[in-house]
Amino acid sequence: MLDPIVAFFARMLGAIRRGLGLVFAWIAWPFLAGHGWYRQRNWIVKAPLALLVLLLAGLYGYFLVQTQSWTGFNTQYIANYKLADRKAAGQDLTPEPAATATPPATAATPRRCETSAIVDVTADLIDFNVNRNAWISSMLLFKLGLFGMSWDDTPFLDNKASFQRGVNQAVRRTSIELVDSLGRVRGTSGINSDLQNARGNLQFDESSWYFGFQPFGPKTPTPSYYRAAINSLRKFNVDLGACNATFDGRADNLIEFIDRISNDLGSTSDVLAERSENHNFGWFDTRADDRFWFAYGQLYGYYGILSAAGADFSKVIAERNVGALWGDTMKQFQAALRIQPFIVSNGREDGFIMPSHLATMGFYILRVRSNLVETRAVLGGR
């Protein structure tokens, strides 16, 4: 009775063994051929080649460490901001002068306003991507790939890059909304130059290195642009804290912000669904991990940004009585971020052996999106 099951596992293990043998032979062949050629050369050729091999070994060692080390990764990172203690963004915090019969002849107390938690979290997410960690997508060895094959087309060393791009997607969307609506008073006021600079820098190509071919010539690498965006965002918050900038915390701005995020998450859920339905090769789908960790990074970014929005729009949330619904949405984010498989599998949804992590992630994204849509409806009075 158990013979068919035993035979199935035996065939599967045999196929895995043969596949690994072919992969090893494919990887080892250039090195074996090169070793034979190298032994026949004199020291004038051997010395530079040996130095080159040592340099490549060091670079690949550094690359391996950077792709596997996720410095500062913490799904509860939002607790560091103590958002419950913050007022609505832009609220005047200047203390009222004490009433006395003869006020002292002192300089006027400088005005203070509450800074934006959204801006703080956005700047810190960029810092997490490019300062506390290396930005993988623009590293030379990531661009060169595995013997010319893109790392995204392999099951190796690309999860962190996909996660970073997912976080960056959330950051980019937020920077656009800060410029277009949150950092100005309605559509007729001027655009804040710091937020404009941050948005421009964050739209830069994610994979730029020091040199490129399109166009040909030297370039500024991607992390430099993103670091400039951090400085611009922090400068905006300094000006906002001094009451010299604007954060427009109206209900319609929050509704629009939620709409944009919902649409963004809806697009990602469609990508997950397409991959899950049409490429369900279980553990052998080499692009499943890219889709999964991009979606995970996007949720990781939006969890912090929307938690911060709860503080920046605290007046609106209290007035419209959506606090409980907002809290439920954050719980859905937390539930999604608890899914951290060691190996991402893209099996059939009704599969017995290989799970469908893409379908699971898509389910949680739709749960989050459903809560956001409901929150938006309540805020809009529907």
Image (spheres, rainbow, N blue to C red):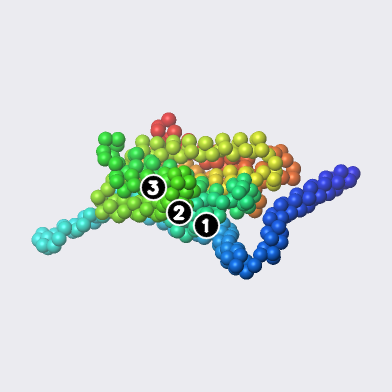
Q: Position of residue 249 (x, y in %)?
A: 33, 42
What residue sits 38% from the left and 41% below the top?
A: 177
Badge number at residue 210:
2
Q: Which of the 4 image quadrants contains residue 124?
A: bottom left
Q: List the residue tagged with mark 1.
A: 73
Q: Position of residue 366 (x, y in %)?
A: 55, 38
| Category of crowding for the residue at label 3, using alpha-carbon neighbours closer than 10 angstroms: few (below 14), some (14–19), many (at least 20) | many
Q: Work out whether residue 339 or residue 286 is closer to the camera in this orientation and state it.
A: 286
Separation of disc 1 and disc 2 at Cα?
27 Å
- Locate residue 54 relative to residue 38 in the image: left or right: left
What residue sits 62% from the left and 45% below the top?
A: 153
- Locate residue 285 relative to residue 321 in the image: left or right: right
Disc nearer the start of the sequence (1/2): 1
Disc nearer the start of the sequence (3/2): 3
| Category of crowding for the residue at label 2, using alpha-carbon neighbours closer than 10 angstroms: few (below 14), some (14–19), many (at least 20) | few
What residue type is disc 2 on? Tyr
Separation of disc 3 and disc 1 at Cα?
24 Å
Separation of disc 3 and disc 2 at Cα?
16 Å
Badge number at residue 247:
none
Q: Which element carries disc 3, helix, strand or loop? A: helix
Q: List the residue tagged with mark 3.
A: 201
What residue sits 81% from the left and 50% below the top?
A: 14
